[in-house]
Image: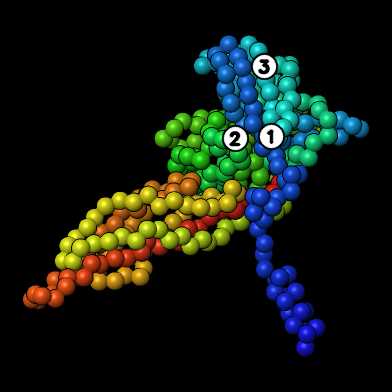
Amino acid sequence: MRLLHRLLLVGVVLATPIVPRAADREPGERSVVRLQVITDAGEAYGACVLISRENRGAEVVLHFLTSSHLFRDAEGDRLAMHAIRLFLDERRSVDVAPADVIMPAGTLVDVAIVRVTTAATDLVPRPITLEAPPVGEVFLISGFDAHGKPATAGQRVRFRSSLLAVGDREPSSLTGCVGAPAISQRGVFGVVSECTSGRPPVVAVLAMAGSFLERYGGRAPVQTSLLPQFVFADRQVTGPIVMVACDAIRTGELDVPLELETQESPIDVSADFVNRREVRLAEVSVLDVRDRSVRVRFTLGGAPAPPSPPRVCPQGQALVSMRVNVAVARSPQ
């Protein structure tokens, strides 16, 4: 019986899909790094994604994909570059020669390749695709927060053309996200070209950059992933208890924080009131979904007053509960 019990336990463990938490990931699962650029226009921070690596003994040649916006002026001319630095991890950075920043001759496609040769690194190339997702589909932006820590922002395609795609909300968890990879289920389909506070991101798609990537992106960079780049999961989030006086109507708005893992991004959210007590009306709706919070509007009506004193008029209350559908980013494959 003990042996059978152990086998059953093992079967349960093996049958349960496990998504690693950010803190449990192996170092070699990283593909996105921060980028610092100092030009005549000043200092700028962005991001880039590794798309190819070639081991050469004790050294490795790395090819990163990013946005040419970091290296061009408003007219599209190449800026004079005084310093370019890649932060490979929290303790290690590498300087890049201006000659190793390669951009297309024209400005039609907003991409650039940054090439470096360095000592061995555990960075893993991310697969890329020339096919952008259609309108309405989910994609992720992988970048960094204000403290330089990895962060992910979920989006839906609101608009798409042969040159660009636009998300549906501000990537509020990201800072300096120009050049950050936009990732569909098939791989990196573009890089962030515009990342303005209060606005959805604009992504330069790779559909027109195939020949450029094949020529300058290292060894066969256009390799669409056979595995989905993210999976979906549901999270249950409880917000605050809302109180209302007896025989009163209360309306208002609340910001409910989302405590998610680094690789998790909210996609769809629905809200309801649960554990209702002494209320005759309870309505709540989602107004805005941000990377780490949800804004809701509510109306709560207290129970009718007792027909006559001296009975106590009870205070009403209800608990905000939200079902959050999240996209969970997979490691590079």
Q: Position of residue 266 (x, y in %)?
A: 50, 52
The residue that label 2 is drawn on is: 148
Q: Secondary structure at mark 2?
A: loop
**What is the number of the mark on residue 90?**
1
Q: Nearer the viewer, mark 1 or mark 3?
A: 1
Hey, what amino acid is under mark 3?
Answer: Ala
Determine whether 82 is above or below 331 in the image: above
N-terminal-most mark, 1 or 2: 1
291 relative position to 102: left or right: left
Which sits earlier in the primary sequence, circle 1 or circle 3?
3
Label located before the other in sequence (3 or 2): 3
Q: Residues within 10 Å of mark 1 (few under 14, many from 20)?
A: few
Q: Which residue is mark 3?
A: 83
Q: Position of residue 16 (x, y in %)?
A: 67, 68
* Residue that lies at the very extreme toward the right in this rendered image: 57
Element marked by disc 3: strand
User: What distance separates the C-alpha of mark 1 from that of mark 2?
Assistant: 9 Å
Q: Quadrant of the N terminus?
A: bottom right
Which quadrant holds residue 122?
Answer: top right
At 70% from the left edge and 74% from the top edge, which residue is drawn? 12
* Marks 1 and 2 in Cβ contact (< 8 Å): yes
Q: Mark 2 Cα within 10 Å, few/some/many (few <14, many 20+)?
A: some
What amino acid is labelled 1 in the image? Glu
Counting every numbered tag in the picture gives: 3
Q: Position of residue 272 (x, y in %)?
A: 36, 63
Q: Residue at x 91, y 32 (%)?
A: 57
Q: Residue 229: tell me if it is visible.
A: no
